[in-house]
Image (tube, rainbow, N blue to C red):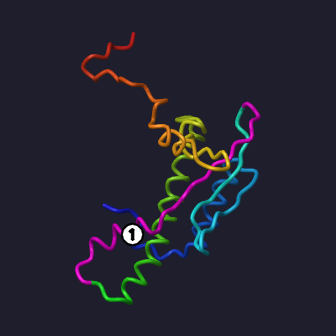
Amino acid sequence: MIKNYTSGVPVERTVMRIEVALIGAGAIGIYKDYKDGVLGAICFSIQDPENRLLSVRLPADAKAVYEVLRARMKRPRGETLKKLMDQSARTSWRLIEDWIKIQVSLIEMRQAEFLQVFLPYIWNGKQTYYESLKEGGFKALPEHVESKSKRTKPE
């Protein structure tokens, strides 16, 4: 089930809601990253509890959403495909909005820490932490994780 695939909320309104949520979470700077006139990411800065200034980049890939939705259509017409691209942008940003609000709620309710949920999106100005791990073949991850049946019970 794809959430928000019928959203009629304009991208601009969703982005405004995202900005409000980020400001409420302590963001001290927010900017938008456009490519070819299309919003591709929202970036923000925040100070962590150790007073480090962290940059976060949250991308939304409307083209990927378009491909998923397009694959589910039988025989769309040209006008339908244009509408589908607009719908894909709305859907991708609504998904980001929902995700951010859930992550901020987890942080506020002390169910998670900021870095626990936003670590993959920490931005060094060129790439996210996740992209860095991926580029390095995920070598920073543990080589072996014990299977559930071999784990010892916590004391």
Instruction: Give the vertical position of 76 relative to 2 (above or below).
Output: below
Instruction: Give the vertical position of 64 relative to 151 (above or below).
Output: below
Q: Quadrant of residue 33?
A: bottom right
> What range of the chain is rendered magenta?
50-75
Give the mark count.
1
**Residue 62 among those drawn in magenta:** yes
Quarter the N terminus occupies: bottom left
The residue nearer to you, when weighing 45 against 25, is 45
Q: Residue at x 59, y 73 (%)?
A: 36
Q: Residue furthest top?
A: 155
- Amino acid type of the residue that numbered disc 1 sits on in the rendered structure: Tyr
Q: Residues within 10 Å of mark 1 (few under 14, many from 20)?
A: some
Q: Residue at x 61, y 75 (%)?
A: 37
Secondary structure of residue under mark 1: loop
The residue nearer to you, when weighing 131 against 22, is 131
Q: Residue at x 60, y 41 (%)?
A: 108
State the image coordinates of residue 76 (x, y, percent, origin top left).
Answer: 29, 84
Query: Seen in the image, is 33 located left or right of residue 69?
Result: right
The residue nearer to you, when weighing 135 against 149, is 135
State the image coordinates of residue 87 (x, y, percent, origin top left).
Answer: 44, 76
Q: Residue at x 70, y 37 (%)?
A: 48
Q: Residue furthest front?
A: 136
Instruction: Give the vertical position of 69 relative to 98 (above or below).
Output: below
Residue bearing mark 1:
5
State the image coordinates of residue 120 (x, y, percent, origin top left).
Answer: 53, 43
Quarter the C terminus occupies: top left
